[in-house]
Structure formats: C-alpha cells, structure tokens
Image (spheres, rainbow, N blue to C red):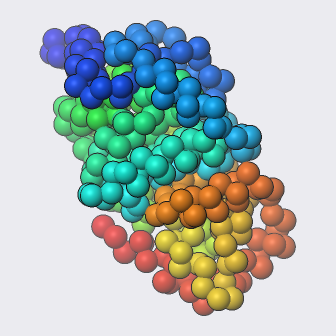
Amino acid sequence: MSGFLPTRRQFLYAGVAAASTAISGSACKRSQTSPLAAAPSDVVPDAAVPDVAKATAIAEHSVAAMPTRTLGRSQLTMPVLGLGGSASPLSRGGQEAEAIALIEQAYTGGIRYFDTAANYGPSEERLGKVLPAVRSEVMIGTKTSRRDRDEAWRQLEQSLERLQTDYIDLWQFHAITYDWDVDTLLDEQQGAIKAAAEAKEQGIIRAIGITGHNNPEIFVKALNRYPFDTALIPINAADRHTPQPFIDHVLPVAQQHNTGIIGMKVPAYGRLFQPGVLSGMTEALGYALSQPQVHCCIVAADTPAQLAENLDAARGFTPFTAEQLLAMEQRTAQVWQEANFFRRWS
C-alpha cells in the first residue's frame, strides 16, 4: 500500500475546511451528539464557523418525531422515513430554491435521514447548503458508482466536499446489477470494498451498503459474500407479482445476516395511486414498512404538498395485518408491470 492512505484523512479535513470557507455559513461545528445520529467519537470537528442562527431557526420549528428503528447490524437508528435525493428538485438544475425549501421542510417535519448519490446532479451540493447547520442531528447516506479502490476513494472525497461534512453515515455501492459488479468491488486487491473498509476504519464512514433496483439474486449473492451493513432495494405492494420479488428473495437473506433494509420505489413514482389500486402514501408506505426486516424507506418529493403527505403517513404508521397486506397486493395485480418499470433500467 502506498503512502496515499495514512494522510488521507488529514487531506479530507483540509479539503472540507477549505470548501466550507468558500461557502459562507454552509457548515457548522458539530454540537453535542444526538441519540439519533451519534458521530464517531474520534472525528475532528469541522473547521468552519458554525451557522448558529440557521441551526437555531431550523430546530425551533421541529415537530414531534416519527417512529424510529435501528437499521439492522449498522446500529444506526433513524426515523422510518428518509428524504430521497433523486427525481426531485434536489437533483434538477435550476431548482435550487425549491430543493432547499424541501430539505428544510423535511427536517422540520421530523426526517433525519437524507439520501443522495455522487451522480444525482446537484443533490449532494444542495444538501450541503442546509444540513451542516444541524449535522449532529441528521444522518446522510450517499453512493458511489465506482467499483475499484482508487476511483471509489476519489468519489468519496468529492461527496464529502459537496456535502460539507467530514464523515458519511452510510456509504453505498450504487446500482449493483450484475455478477461483475459484485466480483469487481469485492476484489481483495483493488476492489472498491477496500476503500470502504479503510474509510470506515478511519471514521470517515460509519456503515457500508449496496443499492440496486432490478436483480434480487445479485443481492442474495452479495449479502452472502460480504457483511454489508445495509441494502437499499425496491419494496412496494406490486413486488410480489414480479417473477423474482425482492421481498421473497432478499428479505429472508437480510434477516439471516441482520442486514439493514431501506425500501425505495415505494409508490412506484405514483403508478400505484391509480383508481382502484392504493389510496395514497398511508397504504404505500405502510405496506413497505410492514415487511419483515424493512427498517426505513426513502421517498422523494416534487412539491411541499407531496412531502407533507409523506410525513403524515410516516408519523401515523402502524403495521398492517397479513390480511391487509394481501388485499393491497391483490389490488396491484392489474398494474404490476407498469409499477415495476424500473426493473428494466440497467
């Protein structure tokens, strides 16, 4: 191993501090650790001057917390709803004001987990304009599409700089689809898993996960080969109609390894809200959260009204009975192919 690694963390601190200085008030010194998002004890506080006024203003508007769950083996505890960072103003050019308003609404509404990725356009940067003021109170999950060690490290550094933070709560390998993805990233010599293990050892990341949306069997293979802390997979009421349901294939393996499961594609971009299918987010989110080993769901929002509906559904969540879950599955039978369109993405 080269001398690249021992100075890596010092390099990251310097980079974050420099970037923070360039964006006035965008970062703040972490205050007393929150029980929802405990920072690693050995992480050095951010060097930027804290934006106390902004942090106070956001915190004063906080509402009652929604239910929380521990994310499997990761030991991260988070509310049952997180904010998705793609397919919304967070990831679209020309919508920065709308994005920042949604992020602040999410926080004041009780969301403490924010999802993003290195390739979600401006998503990381927009979270980095809001979350540093309340960093000790939130958890951030981002993703890398890189499969080799050095490229993964570079993308991690980029994410840290964009997010204006010196640690990531959950770093995930994005869009695991083929055998090649798993074989390459788990390569003992140059695989991206080496970057993740090194970063975790240094306290730069807290948990390691994988994500994907179209191949349940590749998740079974990955979870049986490596003790990933989490997996982000599609969980919705139409899943069981597919030839290979994520619910039936992946969740039992996740239970065996106590892998934390985060659900996505919960309303299938609204395709489950057609007449005679699901009535709204209360059913869509409740279905996903009622599955065994599903700890949290991420849902993006286009508008404040959509986000408000998502928040209401999460705060009022109670598990559905087996009979209620079956009834929802029966109602999605007519739209299952349309609702699982993302299975065709490569």
Question: Can residue 259 be seen by looking at this rendering?
Answer: no
Residue at image location 54% in from the left, 53% down from the top: 298
Residue 271 shows in the view:
yes
Please name whichever residue, 55 or 188, is drawn nearer the observer in this view of the structure: 55
Residue 271 position in % (x across, y down) = 53, 79
Quarter holding residue 137: top right
Q: Is residue 278 left or right of residue 24?
A: right
Residue 56 position (above or below residue 63): above
Identified at 67% across, 73% down, the residue is: 280
Tell me if 343 is positioned left or right of 277 in this view: left
Q: Name the residue rendered at 81%, 63% in the picture.
A: 320
Q: In which quarter of the image is the C terminus?
A: bottom left
- Residue at 37% across, 75% down: 344
255 or 126: nearer the viewer: 126
Query: Where residue 265 appears, x then y in whole percent?
Result: 51, 65
Q: Is residue 331 above or below residue 326?
A: below
Horizontal side of residue 202 vs 12, given as left or right: right
